[in-house]
Amino acid sequence: MPTAEKRNWKNEIRDVIILIAIGLGMTVIFGYTNSGRQIGIVGSFTVLMWISLWKGNEGIGTYISTKVSWVKTPVKSLVLHSIATILYTPVTVLILMKLYELLFKVDFGDSYDMIYSAMVITIIISLFMHGRGFLKSWKEAELEAERAKRESIKANYESLKNQVNPHFLFNSLNALTNLVYQDQDKAAKFIKQLSEVYRYVLDTRDREVVSLREELNFLESYLFLQQIRFGNNLNIQMLVENTEGNIPPLAIQMLLENAIKHNVISTDQPLTITIKRDKDKLIVENSLQKKRLHPHDVSGVGLENIKRRYEFLSSHEVSVAEDSQAFKVTLPILTAVS
């Protein structure tokens, strides 16, 4: 299969051949066929002019497109492209004319007519190119948005799957079985909190964001289940006073689930997880005491899904930091979906 670089070179060669054919065709059509020398001079000039204007404007347009987005700022992009075309075209034509005057002693007569004709032709070509560039950028933006939506759907599904998977249900029911014989009142509360967890998962599966207050309220139910399971071996410090703002649903829960899954939790090594707010960021940090996992269980899917959801919802990125003592994830708090 040909590489993208080879395909680009083939396209460039094809474009040059087409422009040569157009230039020579115009030479014949306009009657510059009195002599072989005239055909050669005028034909080569026309071919060079077409190649210079087409490829030059295309290259400038490509460069501007990398700096200014057609989709985000179409008016600014159009103005810059138009200015570049208006400046580049007459300068290029004048340089070619002076070059041919020096090399072949050609008298172009009224050079303004030549520049005017080149400008008209170039503007027509540029309109086509700018339109194509805008449509291409718009199509790429649509495809990227569609990919992001699929990632968001996948992330939401993964969140749901992480909660409803057999391991979570087995661990919860196993803890409940032991609790029924020890403390029936606590067992009843356990069942209620378990139902609250599943209700929240189902209620938020179609939502892109939830309020931080909702998410933290849900965490109370989730953490109750986990602390029944681990007791004092799991120490959760909730240090969030300001609950304003939004966050992707189950994002914090997935981080807690990862911390519990990947770290040793025992009497000798209790796991401490801290959830705190720093201005417009939420920080989830856990003590680092990694346990050996089967390679099949070390997927990193949860954290990757959170990152993907933030890419879809906002320009703010999820930050991950790890040292010998702790693992920390910083989640931006969204004031609005942007």
Image (tube, helix red, strand yellow):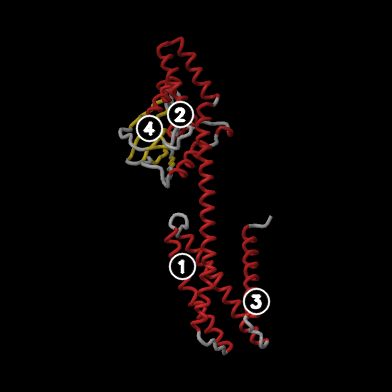
Viewer-closest of 102 and 274: 102
User: Residue at image x 51%, y 73%?
Assistant: 120
Q: Are marks 2 and 3 in contact (CB under 8 Å)?
A: no
Q: Are marks 1 and 2 in contact (CB under 8 Å)?
A: no
Q: Secondary structure at mark 4?
A: strand
User: Residue at image x 53%, y 45%?
Assistant: 146
Query: Spatial distance from mark 2 to mark 4, Cα to Cα?
Result: 26 Å
Total numbered badges shown on the rendered structure: 4
**Residue highlighted by disc 1:** 82
**Residue highlighted by disc 3:** 25
What amino acid is found at the position of numbered circle 3 in the picture?
Answer: Gly
Residue 183 position within the rendered picture, expressed as x and y whole percent measured from the top left: 42, 11
Q: Closer to us: mark 2 or mark 3?
A: 3
Residue 292 position within the rendered picture, expressed as x and y whole percent measured from the top left: 53, 31
Q: Earlier in the sequence, mark 1 or mark 3?
A: 3
Q: Is residue 37 above or below residue 212?
A: below
CA neighbours of label 1 inside 10 A, class few (<14), some (14 to 19), many (20+): some
21 on left or right of 250:
right
